[in-house]
Image (spheres, coloured by chain):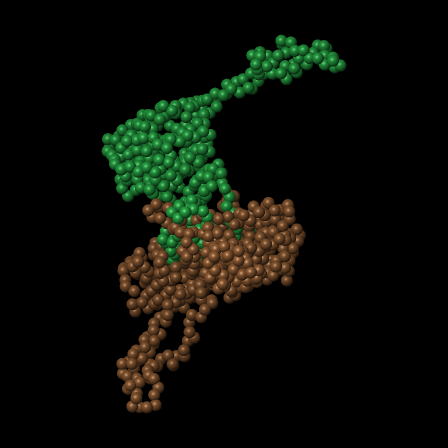
């Protein structure tokens, strides 16, 4: 199925060439449909997260305004957009020069290769374009029936909770399969160790031991009665299954949840994915596609993409440098026990076993890693030094952001923390029948960083409107456990022991 | 093709204007009007509505950056945006940052706040004259003789009188052929302007208050500079006494002690009288304080100086009262009482950084 109708002949030729180069290098991508859009349309599509059609909501209008203004004032423009779908769709900005279009196409094939092959995307819906259009239709239908305001208000509240999903759940099994009811309803009796000899029983299974065993079984049963049985990280799922929602509310919330899961892997592989695409556009352009007359424009654009600003991490830059470093290390054999144990600086510098495994290695890594595991495994001391990475933080005394440290361990730790759980606090449902009053208890798994409290209170308010009964959130504030509560009318908080 | 998103966009605009969904009002953030010169970036005020999420407090978080610098060095580019792994839809968009010149920035500001162009003071009062060579006359000093026109005149005369021989084209001008440049004195509206910033640096003005003044003064400078070629700035700080300082000192001095606003006004008046004759300067005194003055007597003195001496001499007197936990905020009330209707007085209360937006509009919205 070749739908090249949207491309003018000139761009079609470029596309054929670039696609050919990409395949020669071994990239493996879905059929990709390029569309050429005017700036207004591309801003719209970008505001919709890369899709031509989303459910009606003012937030997309807000993003659109930001993009449109940025373009009008000459502050920013979108060069390229591509979506994870089969076939994949990519958009080109009409007014771009041919050399830019070339670069963008090469970049896009990198992304689509990544979407198709990286494990994080394996569970995502590859017909998401249709699915989002379907979501849009459903939400419109509710709005026609119930009024724009009512449905939109509900969406606002759902969006406030959209990050309360379990980012790992598509990749692990969280819940055991349900036991059948009969088995579950009987009390289990402890039997102790098996013994044939009656007279030995009291020695092998003394009463204290038997009591302890029985208690273990009873506790287990009690835990099963707990609701939920174990803390539920997918708060949205818990609400879908247990909150007293109307049918349309249930449907809208499940739409929000589904879309959040669809977009999540893109955030969890941002560094790898952008780095990968940048690696390939630079390879394809400089080795194959670039015309001598285009070198300056290409260099200008490419360096703009990779520019760094002190307070921000540029995923394009960090990503592409890591990929190149990785390739280089596997080409030269700079890995493994022998290399790690070598502590001669000079020797390490000159280390080259001429293995030539680099290309193979990066293709393998693009399949099995995400940003967290990628950084965890392949960020090296040398790399941190060379790339001048540092950690920064807010200095209360000087009232400004300052560079804190350049030490390898600290940088890596901070980087991983920023990426873990998407840079979001980990919050789960601990109890759906808290205090035996049908209240909801959320617990924040505190890892050293406090929540932004005013936001937390407002969000709690939104949780309450879904749960309808009072809701609680336990988190640590300046080192002490605090329980925030919203009962539908007012907020309160108190210190607790946990 | 009518874009589908226009509906969403219209709805967003309505929310921002407060027409619908007032419950979202509290989440609206008027993107901060911050600007720094040179390479540092600027953000343009586009309102956003921030739906609350469970998220980390920014200042306790920090992050990882890239570049030169020693531990302890400040990050040079404004506040970072912590959490590069934010939830969102990173489909791989390239966003290219482009430098904006101050001129363009001023345009954007003007457009955003719907500021009128400044009308410099009436021409009848401020005139500078410039000589402009506008015509030709048969008499004048030799130094201004117009060679070409003289030649042409001589040629014309010789042809008319038949003494021109094309085989031997010799042109000999006589006295009557000579032409001279003449000039006119053209009155030019004077475009010199001076901004005199005054700030209370007594103990009650904190760093946050000064930051507000700093941002606000940046935008005032940017806007005025667009309208006046030669903009000068002078800085006066005061507590109980006033002194003139340079820009850096202005924003970083902290004194303790009382506040006598009249001291600053007196000094400003001295500056105006000695350096900026109102007949040739557009004068803009801007005063910022937290509204605390030493005594009602001193306030009376202030009103008197303004009334009698300063207001007649300036384009606009602006007073910005920055809210602080210590200030009583009385001063603006006194000024309002005294000058509420005066057209070249602009008074504004600035509660926090977000108030800067409205305050700039008050100050510059009159087009004076």
> Residue at the location (63% across, 57% down)?
A21
In which image quadrant can residue B249 be found? top left
In which image quadrant can residue A90 be found? bottom right
Q: Nearer the viewer, residue A12 or B25?
A: A12
Q: Residue furthest top?
A: B175
Can residue A77 be seen in the rendering of this structure? no
- Which chain shows up in brown? A
Image coords of residue A61 (percent x, y): 48, 51
For the image shown, how many numbered marks are present on the structure? 0
Looking at the figure, which quarter contains the N terminus of chain A? bottom right
Image coords of residue A461 (percent x, y): 35, 58
In which image quadrant can residue A453 be found? bottom left
Can residue B297 be seen in the rendering of this structure? yes
Image coords of residue A175 (percent x, y): 42, 71
Image coords of residue B250 (percent x, y): 35, 35
Q: Nearer the viewer, residue A185 or B221?
A: B221
Looking at the figure, which quarter contains the C terminus of chain A? bottom left
> Residue at the location (55% across, 49% down)?
A302
> Residue at the location (45% across, 22% down)?
B127
User: Taking B57 as reference, is A234 above or below it?
Assistant: below
User: Taking B304 as reference, is B179 above or below it?
Assistant: above
> Residue at the location (27% across, 29% down)?
B301
- Which chain shows up in green? B
User: Taking A169 as reference, is B242 above or below it?
Assistant: above
């Amino acid at each position: 199925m070749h739908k090249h109708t949207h491309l003018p002949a000139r761009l079609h030729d470029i596309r054929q060439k670039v696609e050919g180069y990409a395949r020669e290098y071994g990239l493996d991508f879905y059929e990709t449909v390029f569309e050429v859009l005017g700036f207004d349309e591309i801003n719209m599509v970008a505001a919709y997260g890369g899709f031509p059609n989303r459910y009606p909501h003012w937030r997309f209008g807000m993003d659109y305004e930001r993009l449109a203004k940025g373009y009008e004032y000459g502050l920013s423009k979108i060069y390229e957009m591509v979506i994870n779908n089969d076939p994949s769709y990519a958009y080109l900005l009409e007014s771009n020069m041919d050399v830019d279009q070339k670069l963008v196409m090469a970049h896009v094939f990198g992304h689509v290769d990544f979407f198709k092959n990286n494990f994080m995307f394996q569970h995502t819906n590859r017909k998401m374009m249709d699915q989002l259009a379907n979501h849009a239709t459903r939400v419109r239908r509710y709005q026609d029936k119930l009024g724009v305001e009512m449905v939109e208000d509900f969406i606002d509240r759902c969006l406030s909770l959209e990050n309360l999903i379990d980012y790992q759940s598509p990749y692990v099994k969280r819940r055991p399969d349900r036991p059948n009811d009969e088995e579950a309803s009987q009390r289990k009796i402890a039997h102790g160790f098996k013994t044939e000899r009656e007279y030995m029983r009291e020695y092998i299974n003394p009463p204290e031991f038997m009591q302890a065993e029985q208690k273990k079984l009873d506790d287990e049963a009690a835990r099963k009665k707990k609701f939920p049985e174990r803390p539920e990280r997918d708060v949205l799922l818990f609400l879908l299954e247990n909150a007293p929602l109307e049918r349309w509310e249930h449907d809208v919330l499940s739409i929000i949840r589904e879309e959040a899961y669809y977009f999540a892997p893109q955030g969890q592989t941002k560094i790898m994915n952008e780095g990968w695409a940048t690696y390939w556009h630079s390879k394809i352009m400089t080795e194959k596609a670039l015309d001598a007359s285009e070198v300056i424009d290409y260099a200008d654009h490419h360096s703009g993409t990779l520019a760094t600003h002190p307070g921000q991490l540029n995923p394009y830059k960090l990503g592409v440098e890591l990929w190149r470093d990785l390739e280089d290390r596997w080409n030269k054999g700079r890995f493994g026990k022998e290399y790690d144990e070598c502590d001669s600086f000079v020797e390490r510098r000159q280390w080259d076993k001429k293995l030539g495994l680099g290309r193979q290695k990066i293709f393998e890594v693009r399949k099995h890693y995400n940003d967290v595991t990628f950084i965890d495994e392949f960020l090296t001391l040398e790399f941190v030094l060379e790339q001048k990475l540092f950690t920064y933080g807010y200095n209360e005394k000087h009232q400004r952001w300052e560079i804190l440290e350049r030490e390898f361990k600290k940088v890596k730790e901070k980087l991983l923390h920023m990426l873990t759980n998407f840079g979001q606090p980990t919050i789960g449902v601990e109890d759906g029948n808290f205090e035996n009053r049908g209240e909801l208890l959320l617990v924040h798994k505190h890892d050293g960083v406090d929540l932004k409290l005013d936001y937390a209170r407002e969000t709690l308010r939104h949780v309450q409107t879904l749960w309808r009964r009072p809701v609680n959130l336990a988190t640590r504030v300046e080192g002490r456990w605090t329980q925030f509560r919203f009962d539908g009318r007012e907020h309160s908080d108190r210190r607790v022991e946990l | 093709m009518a874009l589908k998103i226009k509906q969403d966009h219209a709805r967003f605009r309505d929310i921002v204007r407060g027409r619908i969904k007032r419950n979202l009002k509290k989440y609206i953030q008027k993107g901060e009007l911050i600007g720094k010169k040179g390479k540092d970036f600027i953000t343009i005020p586009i309102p956003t509505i921030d739906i609350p999420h469970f998220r980390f407090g920014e200042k306790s978080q920090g992050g990882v950056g890239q570049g030169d610098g020693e531990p302890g060095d400040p990050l040079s580019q404004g506040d970072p945006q912590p959490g590069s792994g934010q939830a969102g839809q990173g489909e791989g968009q390239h966003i290219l940052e482009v430098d904006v010149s101050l001129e363009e920035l001023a345009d954007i500001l003007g457009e955003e706040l719907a500021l009128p162009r400044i009308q410099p003071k009436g021409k009848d009062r401020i005139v500078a004259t410039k000589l402009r060579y506008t015509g030709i006359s048969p008499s004048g000093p030799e130094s201004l003789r117009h060679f070409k026109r003289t030649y042409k005149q001589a040629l014309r005369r010789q042809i008319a009188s038949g003494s021109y021989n094309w085989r031997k084209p010799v042109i000999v001008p006589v006295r009557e052929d000579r032409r001279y440049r003449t000039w006119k004195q053209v009155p030019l509206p004077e475009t010199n302007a001076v901004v005199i910033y005054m700030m209370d640096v007594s103990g009650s003005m904190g760093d946050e208050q000064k930051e507000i003044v700093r941002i606000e003064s940046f935008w005032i400078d940017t806007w005025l500079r667009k309208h006046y070629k030669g903009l000068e700035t002078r800085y006066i700080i005061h507590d109980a006494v006033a002194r003139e300082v340079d820009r850096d000192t202005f924003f970083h001095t902290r004194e303790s002690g009382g506040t006598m606003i009249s001291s600053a006004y007196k000094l400003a008046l001295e500056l105006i009288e000695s350096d900026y004759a109102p007949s040739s300067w557009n004068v803009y005194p801007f005063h910022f304080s937290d509204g605390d003055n030493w005594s009602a007597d001193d306030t009376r003195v202030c009103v008197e100086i303004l009334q009698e001496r300063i207001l007649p001499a300036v384009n606009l007197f602006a007073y910005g009262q920055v809210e602080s936990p210590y200030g009583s905020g009385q001063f603006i009330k006194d000024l309002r009482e005294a000058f509420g209707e005066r057209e070249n007085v602009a008074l504004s209360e600035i509660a926090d950084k977000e108030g800067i937006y409205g305050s700039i509009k008050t100050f510059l919205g009159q087009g004076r």
